[in-house]
Amino acid sequence: MEIQLGRGKLARRAYGIDEIALVPGNRTLDPSLADTKWKIGNIEREIPIIASAMDGVVDVKMAVRLSQLGALGVINLEGIQTRYADPEPILDRIASVGKDEFVSLMQELYAEPIKPELIEKRIQEIKQQGGIAAVSATPAGASKYGEVAASSGADLFFIQATVVSTDHLSPESVTPLNLGEFCRSMPIPVALGNCVTYEVTLELMKAGAAAVLVGIGPGAACTSRGVLGVGVPQATAIADCTAARDDYYQETGKYIPIIADGGLITGGDICKCIACGADGVMIGSPFARAAEAPGRGYHWGMATPSPVLPRGTRIRVGTTGTLEQILTGPAGLDDGTHNLLGALKTSMGTLGAKNIKEMQQVEVVIAPSLLTEGKVYQKAQQLGMGK
């Protein structure tokens, strides 16, 4: 429904994840019967959760461990891991600097050139330990490093930018990456993102995307919405983009998964994204809190070190448990940030959804009071949902 902002401008109401709730149906099932398997490209995973390609979240060790646990981690080809042979002292500096010096330090550290030999090394380190080597780059980085990533044995390639589209205008001196040609030339599946609209999702799928990432600006460390004023709340964005997925499937017979990317903290957030139509989710800050995470209890966005217009910041997330606790339990916290898989399976059982496809069909209601109704004591005592 369109709303009139003023005489010359109409707007559409959009909803965020915190504004919706999931409605139980006529059936329930034991959580052990809930099938959470999903597929991206030619890779099937038990858990529909991807750790985002942020330097405080995924390194070689994290990518391997996530693979072992049934999930997936993506390493940033334009980050600390591919600029420094020994990233540990660099990560120590990032964690120790004060907030007033942080932006200038990041700009300094990320000015170090990316080294193709380190791209090859990191991918091979993951593969040698039996992990799935998923990597990410910006469109500009993809044109430079896509070939070396593929030849080094990468299993999946993510092209990610704040906003990506197949229709990009550049100065005459710059040749933009042709997403369709890149997808066709790569011997491995290519996921494309990020976007928030039906039309762009459809174009990315036509270009050859193996998956499409949905989300602009909701990430815990992202400031794009404040800096640029750009974004669509995640519940509406996911619903719009999954409509494009379904129409594309009806037209072509090809099913391209949608990945909700950004702003997801708890198991409930993940459940609601899938109920809105997503096939999987990409999360950063929950995994940055793992004892094994490279960020030392800090989390920062991929656009944070921009030399001209940073669109991210560093946030203190702390360390709350092991990666296994956060992903598969047992939970050591009562706020929904541990045992994310258990939360998904329990929610599916409560809703009577046997698999991801059925979870996408559950009833959703607009519920702005969902997280506050009856929670006065939790909020006052900073317990559970009041943290």
Image (tube, rainbow, N blue to C red):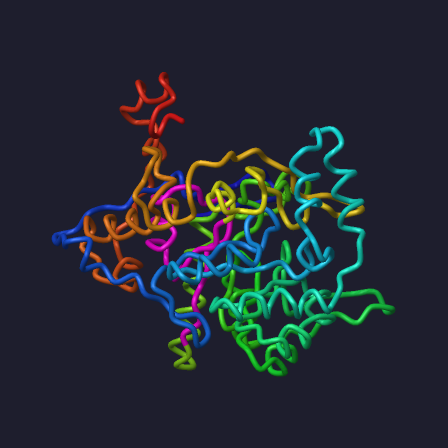
The residue that appears at 59% across and 46% down in the rendered structure is 56
Q: Locate residue 240: give its quadrant.
A: bottom left
The picture quadrant where one finds residue 42 is bottom left
Residue 150: image x %, image y %?
Answer: 62, 76
Q: Point out the residue furthest to the right here.
A: 173
Q: Nearer the viewer, residue 127 or 161?
A: 127
Residue 209 x %, y %: 53, 73
Left or right of residue 123: residue 290:
left
Residue 42 sits above or below residue 106 on the image: below
> Looking at the image, which is closer to me, 147 or 261?
147
Figure label count: 0
Q: Which residue is at 39% across, 52% downward? A: 273
Specify whether residue 265 is painted magenta: yes
Front-lying residue, 322 or 141: 322
In the rendered view, would you say 83 is above or below 300? Answer: below
Viewed as shown, does residue 110 lie left or right of 234?
A: right
Q: What residue range appears in magenta?
A: 255-283
In percent of width and height, residue 134 lies at 54, 66
- Magenta segment includes 378: no
Is 25 situated above or below 82? above
For the C terminus, which image quadrant?
Answer: top left
Name the residue: 54% across, 66% down. Answer: 126
* x, y percent for residue 325: 36, 45
Foreground: 107 or 180? 107
